[in-house]
Image (tube, rainbow, N blue to C red):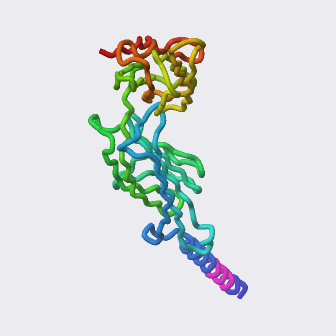
Amino acid sequence: MKNSTLSRLTCIAFVSLLFITNIGCQEDETSRPESSESFTPSLRISSGGNCAEDCIQDDNYFIDSQQAVVQWGGPNQNNNSKTVDIEYYNTETHFVLRVKSTRGWSDLIINGFSSWNGGAVSPNVWGTYSYPLGQDWQACDLESFTLSVSGNGPPAQFLVNYNLFGVCMGCETGFFGDVLSCGYDREANYTFTSDSDQSYIKIQGGLTNFTGADAIVTVSGGNLTQSQSTPGGSSNRIIKVEGSVAACETITINIKWNSTNSGGVVTGSWSVKDGNGSELTPPVLGLECD
């Protein structure tokens, strides 16, 4: 009798244990994320630069970005979400993709193929993936691919479209002058280009046989100011242009003035010096009319 009662109690306990275990398994099943088709990402896109006008110089790259917010179901639905950010740009030789997620991520699926071998990336940490550009790539070529950022919840889906930025061409330092008008009403242009940034330059020169009101001096390019003066007892007018210029930026100085004669040497020698007083180019000697 005792053995029969003990067997009955053991059976009840075993059945109860199975029932409790089954409930636990059902709860685990319902807490799993839903499939990737069950969410809709919200995107925020920002862009910078124009591939037809801007170019890469001194590690100055033009970055586009996107953001996807992924949510999925389950008993803790309010906690089942993540934000995935991507940034992408091109260098002189590579296309670069940067990715981070508030829950971390483990793989990048590009056009359907697993492309990441760097292992799991921690939450809120950028991971960087890059690949070389084609040998004959050109500015405004389109880089386009689908991207799935997977791991820790449903994947975040993106469509990347990016027009490549070309590389700025190099330039040489140069200073030139040209006479446009040789009559009593005179006009001349001076142009200057620097192969590097200059925090301070001074372009200075004279106008011969000057008469009348101030010369009309128009300066384009750079961050420059202009002034003019006449040395005591002289018939020459001194023009001074000074300030900062960027690398490969062309500075143009247009001057219009009145003179007491209509020919001969119409300007004095013009020079360009840096903040230390060193000449950046050979001076432009006096311009002459026929």
Observer-nearest of 47 and 211 = 211
| Residue at the outermost right position | 2
Above-or-below relation of 244 to 67: above
Residue at 58% across, 56% down = 103
Residue 175's quadrant in the figure? top left
Observer-nearest of 262 and 229 = 262
Quadrant, the C terminus: top left
Dominant secondary-structure state across the stretch colored magenta: helix
| Residue at the outermost bottom position | 1
Residue at 53% across, 18% down = 238
Q: What stretch is highlighted in magenta?
A: 8-17
Coordinates of residue 124 in the picture (x, y in percent): 60, 51
Observer-nearest of 154 and 58 = 58
Residue at 53% across, 16% down = 273
Q: Based on the picture, tell me whether residue 9 belongs to the magenta stretch.
A: yes
Quadrant, the N terminus: bottom right
Coordinates of residue 15 in the picture (x, y in percent): 61, 81
Q: Based on the picture, tell me whether residue 74 belongs to the magenta stretch.
A: no
Coordinates of residue 148 in the picture (x, y in percent): 42, 57
Total numbered badges shown on the rendered structure: 0
Observer-nearest of 35 and 262 = 262
Image side of residue 104 versus residue 61, left or right: right
Image side of residue 228 versus residue 254, left or right: right
Residue at 55% across, 17% down = 274
Coordinates of residue 220 in the picture (x, y in percent): 46, 33
Above-or-below relation of 96 to 238: below
Residue 191's quadrant in the figure? top left
